[in-house]
Amino acid sequence: MFNLFKNKEKVENPIEISVSGINPQTENEFLFYNFVQSEYAPHLEKWYQQAKSNGIVFKPQFEQAIKQKVNTGKFENPHKFPSYFKNRFDFIGLQFLSGTDDILSAFELGAHFIIDEKIVHKEKFLFRPNNQILNQPEFKETLEMFEIDEEFVKDFCFEDVWDALDLKLSFNHNLVVCWNKEIEILEEILKANRITDYNINHIQIREIAKDNNLPDLFDNLLKHFNSDLNIDSDLSLIAPTLALEFKDIGIDLSKYARNLNPNERDNYSELKPKAEKKQKSKATTLDIQNENLS
């Protein structure tokens, strides 16, 4: 069985508090500094003190970053994404969260970035759909169910996410992996926002599973590979995990790679505006387990 977390570093006396911290001996400086930057200073201080009391050793530069955040309440990651990783990822897992059945009702994009069978970064981007969708009662109910503030969704349009947050840089130069229809959603969102600077290589896991006589429901496929992931895990993590499983059993992924660009309009000629309605369930986001102290 392939295990995405098989290279997890073991740390004695793991910390059992509310903050899930990053291994202070990690080689991934971007990840640790990002944790320090985003964590609430009092919580970070509590995590740091308990780690020290448990005998966990911190790299000097990480310790200095923590002290700066605790003392001043501010810390900025000195490394930038995706340049820290030279914008080279083995896979980028993709997932959308949608508010209604409308294909353009997506309001959150989730991504996991994989290098050498490790999760080196994960991210979620909120963005607003058009006003007609935004004002629908069903859309508002979905936001309430996921406990997402509508004002946060309104802050950025997808063009902001695509350009200012460098999504296009990573997506245009790496292999994007999705479960099934996520690329179609992405294409429709790009078109709706009149974005044309995309050139995305991608694979669809369900298509590969069907072609190789494997289960084509992702929960059954995960069970087939005895994966630790399950139906509640993020699809942006499930997809690259299964891609690695496929490679492990000798499937040539390049055979299934396709390209999405504004000049290729026949790939999704049968695209339907509404997906099959399914009962919503609250998603569970996995931690970056191979670097966590939990």
Image (cartoon, grey):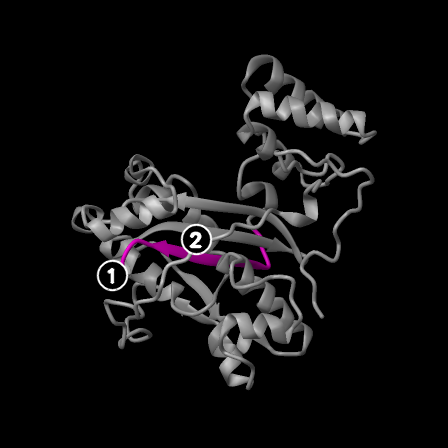
Q: Quadrant of residue 264?
A: bottom left
Magenta stretch encompasses residue 102: no
Please provide percent x and percent y for residue 133.
20, 51
To which residue does mark 2 refer? 282
| Magenta region | 88-101
Would residue 145 be visible to someone looking at this image?
yes
Kind of element beneath mark 1: loop
Sequence-first tag of 2 and 1: 1
Please provide percent x and percent y for residue 143.
32, 46
Q: Mark 2: which amino acid? A: Lys
- Taking depth in this image into account, of 101 and 260 the one nearest to the observer is 101
- The crowding category of the residue bearing disc 1, from other C-alpha atoms within 10 Å (few below 14, some 14 to 19, many at least 20), is some
Kind of element beneath mark 2: loop
Q: Quadrant of residue 251?
A: bottom right
Is residue 270 shown above or below 31?
below
Quarter of the picture holding the C terminus = top right
Residue at 23% from the left image edge and 55% from the top image edge: 192
Q: Quadrant of residue 184?
A: bottom left
Quarter of the picture holding the N terminus = bottom right
Q: What mark, if any, has residue 102 been given in the picture?
A: 1
Residue positioned most to the left? 132
Question: Would you say 122 lies left or right of 290 here?
Answer: left
Q: How many marks?
A: 2
Residue at 72% from the left image edge and 41% from the top image edge: 27
